Amino acid sequence: MIKTKKNFATNIELIIKKIIPIKKANGKRMKKIRLSSGKN
């Protein structure tokens, strides 16, 4: 039980580390799209 719980926690950390940069990149992309659409 303890071992699986530890693995689960580390898996969540890895997933978060992967998701956060993607969200930040998407946020930057959205801002660029808004700026370009504002010009048109």
Image (cartoon, rainbow, N blue to C red):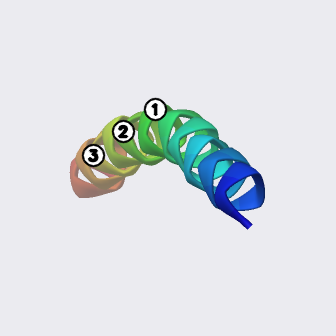
Foreground of the two, 4 or 18 = 4
Q: Quadrant of the N terminus?
A: bottom right
Q: Quadrant of residue 34?
A: bottom left
Marked residue nearer the N-terminal end (2 or 3): 2
Q: Residue at x 36, y 38 (%)?
A: 24
Residue 28, by quadrant, is top left
Residue, disc 2? 24
The location of residue 12, given as percent across then percent down, is 58, 53
In the image shown, does 2 or 13 lie closer to the viewer? 2
In the picture of the structure, the residue carrying the numbered disc 3 is 31
**Residue type at tag 3:** Lys
Which residue is more in the foreground, 29 or 18? 18
Q: CA distance from mark 2 to mark 3?
A: 11 Å
Residue displayed at 71% across by 46% down: 7
Residue depicted at x 43% and y 42%? 20
Total tally of numbered discs in the picture: 3
Q: Nearer the viewer, mark 1 or mark 3?
A: 1
In the image, residue 15 lies at what x, y percent?
Answer: 63, 46
Q: Which residue is mark 1?
A: 21
Q: For the residue carrying disc 1, how many other residues have a C-alpha within 10 Å: few (<14), some (14-19), or many (20+)? A: few
Position in image of residue 30 (x %, y %) = 38, 51
Q: Nearer the viewer, mark 2 or mark 3?
A: 2
Which element type, helix, strand or loop, lies under badge 3?
helix
Q: Amino acid at mark 1?
A: Pro
